[in-house]
Amino acid sequence: MYLIPKPQKIVNYEGCFIIRYDSYVVTDTACSQLLNQQVLLFMKELKKYLGFELQLSKGAPKAGDIVLKVNDSFAPEHYQLDGCGQVLEIIGSQTGLWCGLQTLLQMVKQEGACLPQVKIEDYPALKHRGHYLDVSRGRIPKMEWLKKWIDKLAFYKINQFQLYIEHTYLFRDLTELWRDDTPFTAAEIMELDEYCYLRGIELVPSLSSFGHLYKLLSTKEYHHLCELENMQDQPFSVLGRMRHHTFDVTNPESLNLIKSMLKEYMELFHSRQFNICADETFDLGTGRSKAKADEIGKDHLYINFVKELTGFMIENGRRPMFWGDVIVGFPDLLKELPPETICLTWGYHPEQREYEVMKMAEAGAIQYCCPGCCGWNELVNLNYNAYRNIKKMAEYAEKHGAIGLLNTDWGDFLHVNHMDFSIPGMIYGAAFAWNSQTGEYEEINRQISKLEYGDTSEKLLSIIDQLKDNTAFAWQSFCFVAETEMGILSQLGAFAEAQDYIEKALALLDQVDQKCENLVQIQTELYQSLKSIPQAGRAAVYPYLIAVEGIRIINLIGKFITAQKGLKTYQTMVDPKQLAKELDIWFYHYKQIYRQISRESELYRIQSFINFYGDMLRS
């Protein structure tokens, strides 16, 4: 039996505790109204795993019952589970009992009605354990999928969730911002907020408020507030969207506009926190604000605007958060901000250095450490990179007194990866934020394969792990080459940068034929894995089958391009027209999967790249 996150203390005994069809769930009279509602959610899930429904009661329990007891002396999320007596007893704080119920669900999911007799003492290493999902740069998930995702977060004891919003909320008066998209409405955000609240998760609002305002600062109405002039006339680019569109902070309209947006959005949430982002302000001081930057320095230009935003949050009863990538360059200015401000210190490298977390700790910052699921720019997440990155950032969080870990799932370059591919990365984050003694990579992958996917062979994630070594022409290169050939990057002045990246990427094509053969074998192994996965869980494999095929086809497109340009020679070459047909067939299936869980959002942009390559191959 596997439990994720790993309990702090667990002792196993001989024998089993049987949950009978006539057993009751007996709650404490001290249970809060929220906990009573959560018990009903627990019982609904329990029925799925047992195949029969228990009754609910208060008062004196009988043998075979599940008993919940509130003990207010326990710290938040601290609980004890004892399955060795006549009843299965969970004792804890109100939030601790909810965590204990998730542990019990994991036990029943694996063992059914006959549970091993155990005693568990459990509590989290970090108070705040969050997940951060990009819903702006490519995909906007459907509500049904988001609710299933929130259920998974709760199952693994995540207690905070954030949605990254740039332009994908239907602001009442900013119609030009969302007119060509499929944004969330206020009613949907409030529905998600309530759904999270009932499952012990704080839905913290997050809104770009300084940099990363591509859509807003490209509109006819507000382009004059962009730091760089004439950005509204530039063609769309997946690279350009990542690099530009920062507010001109010297224009008072900028502050007034973003304050009105923050105010409208914050009112939809239970949370008294707000992530204002304020990251990657690459253009600051290089355009309209250059004169002011020359006068006071870019550092003061930055901190003055962030100070206004954080002060606005305090005035409205919210605790501000912001990304720490800019301020780490001048941490002494942290003292300019309200003392309760939370700095979100991020770093996504598998061998992520300690420096940024250490510097912010030395400056007295209250901080979260923020690793990532490593799915951006990939058709399939790089789980090994995510594991290493998350493990290190969790270590740094404990070492330097961070109050939380916020695990990020970004959507750079159109969020091409299927969103469920971030499940392993999400679980790594949940595991390490709760208990730093989480197992090694291969071990936790076996556990996830069994617990999450029901894979009795425990090999599913090890099969998927092979994909990291068999990409020859990366999705990012796929995008760069297309935008280069279309002339887009030349118009943006980014041609040389893209060319440098592409030249480095070409080295990966040396073994393209072998990698494509490997991908065929990996796909075969995925088909074979279905026999060890319950019928209800087999649908999770289908998107991987499609992704593997996509990697293979894109590898071959990279091979064709390099041969066509005389950059490399190969002994064999595919028929380009046949490859174009394979690309079309693959993308047909890709779109089916995409639309199962996502709104249309920016699927049309991915389609434009597919069409470009299909036309190129046919010509």
Image (tube, rainbow, N blue to C red):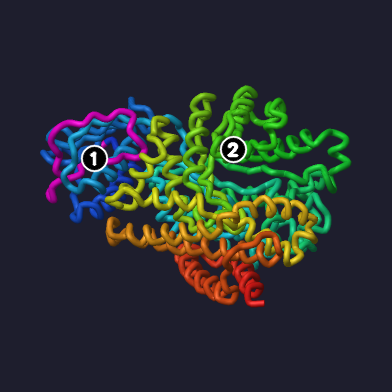
- Which range is magenta? 1-29
Q: Is residue 85 left or right of residue 306?
A: left
Residue 594 place in picture, x, y as percent? 49, 65
- Residue 239 lies in what quarter of the image? bottom right
Question: Between disc 1 and disc 2, whose residue precedes?
Answer: 1
From where the camera sits, is residue 426 visible? Answer: yes
Query: Quick check: can you spot residue 144?
Result: no
Mark 1 falls on what kind of element? strand
How far is disc 1 from disc 2 in space, using C-alphas?
41 Å
Name the residue nearer the viewer: 557 or 575.
575
Q: Quadrant of the C terminus?
A: bottom right
25 drawn magenta: yes
Q: Is residue 76 magenta?
A: no
Q: Which residue is mark 1?
A: 27
Residue 598 in the image: x percent, y percent?
A: 50, 63
The structure residue drawn at horizontal position 47% and vertical position 50%, both measured from the top left corner, is: 422
Name above or below for residue 525 compared with residue 246: below
Image: 386 above or below 509: above
